[in-house]
Image: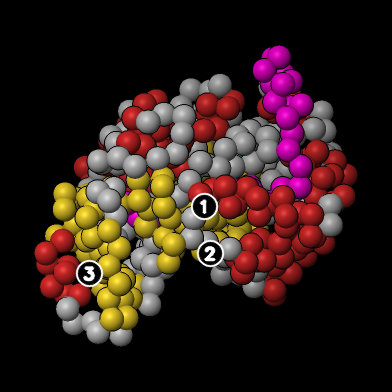
Amino acid sequence: MSASLFTNVSITTPISGERPAAGSEQGRVVSWERGALLACDGIIQAVGDEDEVKATAEAFDDVTEEDCDGCCMIPGFVDPHTHICFAARREKEFSMRLAGKTYLEILAAGGGILSSVKAVEGATEEELFEETLSNVLSALSTGTTTMEIKSGYGLTTELELKMLRVIGRIAEETPLDIVPTFMGAHAVPPAYKSDPDKYIDLMISEMLPAVKAQGIAKFCDVFCEEGVFTVPQSRRLLQAARDLGMGLRIHADEVFDTDGAGLAAELGTISAEHLLAANEKNLAAMGRAGVIADLLPATAYSLKKPYAPARKMIDLGVPVALATDCNPGSCFCESMPFVVGLAVMNMNMTVEEALVGATLNPAWSLGMQDKIGSLEKGKQADFLLLDGETPAILAYHAGTSPVVEVYKRGVYVS
Ligand code: NIG
Ligand code: FE
């Protein structure tokens, strides 16, 4: 059997446990200063001290050795929250926000998410694919090897399915593992403005069953927010999705505290996302329920909001994951190195906590913890080589990507 042996590399990786890493285990990693990794058929056969891994490699007939030049190796990033499937940028809106308009004011006036809906409607499937592809490949080049992508710029059955088809094509035509999420509940369509409950009815009676029938989404997500969907509306939709066997995620307390985090704990959703304004009582309930907090510091940066209280969450035993939220409105950022840098510098996470937050915990939040998220025997050989001595380079070398090479299932991809 032929195998690839990566040597002359310092390795840092989270190590798997029974559940997502939380509290004092949020930063649990192991390191080998002179390490090596052996991969065969895309799967890690051995990882650890270079001499020991070399000894294991002797059992394989045909071993190709790759000298990693003293780089630092970490697992590929897992980005568990993106809206990267969009047809047009919204640069003018960004300037409006800089001039003082708020994100929710722009949405209420028919812009924001609703302008992205018009763009998806006006684009051919090929155009939507090309625009999405270029941003996904940019994310790959900065180390994202697994990515969740939400629909939600369609808001009709036809357009939501169009988005999910494009997301499926991204999965087929790029090296990344892609996890599709149905997010028809991303905004209230103008025709339902006076009665959003009717739109929830439509999603339950028509959209969710169609998505389920085509098997093109693993999760259902909802924007639970003031002026968007209320807690009772979000609960009703998520329960219907659960009845169909879909996993649940929720945009909770991004701008205002509407008890979205409490709903996440009540339903036991796999994750609750954003949480900039979530209160301590609900965060503690999330900790007890084992809900993963997917935090999106680049959105706080782009919206000029206070960062999510990551330290408090870690103290409360809430597992923390990090994501880009890449979208054309609140956060046009596909770079996980930037997100890790913000988590370390502005949310006071340690480098190790942020590394677990960008790899193993998001793998749990996508239900893929057995395959990805850490460099351990039996998992996919998804890894990055960084131009630095330790993962601290991700925060230390600001404003650029220290990711020099990206490997997916043992193969060089960027
Ligand atoms: O996570 N909050 C809702 N959705 C995105 C923004 C999407 C957009 O503005 O296009 C978010 O911030
Ligand atoms: Fe989002």
**Left or right of residue 73: residue 125:** right
Q: Residue at x 60, y 52 (%)?
A: 136
Vertical position of residue 271 compared to residue 350: above or below: below
Pick the residue in front: 144 or 115.
144
What's the mark number on residue 46? 3
Q: Residue at x 84, y 52 (%)?
A: 123
Question: In the structure shown, which secondary structural element does the residue marked by tag 3 occupy?
Answer: strand
- Name the spot of residue 388 as percent of width and height, x first: 30, 40
Q: Quadrant of residue 237?
A: bottom right
Vertical position of residue 131 compared to residue 158: above or below: above
- Name the spot of residue 309 as percent of width and height, x first: 40, 29
On the image, numbered disc 1 is attached to which residue? 140
Q: Looking at the figure, which quarter contains the N terminus?
A: bottom left
Vertical position of residue 44 compared to residue 9: above or below: below
From which residue to which does the magenta span run? 74-101
Q: Residue at x 16, y 75 (%)?
A: 56
**Left or right of residue 162: residue 369:** left
Question: In the structure shown, which secondary structural element does the residue marked by tag 2 occupy?
Answer: loop
Separation of marks 3 and 2 at Cα, in angstroms:
23 Å
- Name the spot of residue 89 as percent of width and height, x first: 73, 38
Pick the residue in front: 321 or 129.
129
Q: Are marks 1 and 3 in contact (CB under 8 Å)?
A: no
Separation of marks 1 and 3 at Cα, in angstroms:
25 Å
Asked whether residue 309 is in view, the answer is: no
Separation of marks 1 and 2 at Cα, in angstroms:
9 Å
**Left or right of residue 283: residue 353:** left
Q: Are marks 1 and 2 in contact (CB under 8 Å)?
A: yes
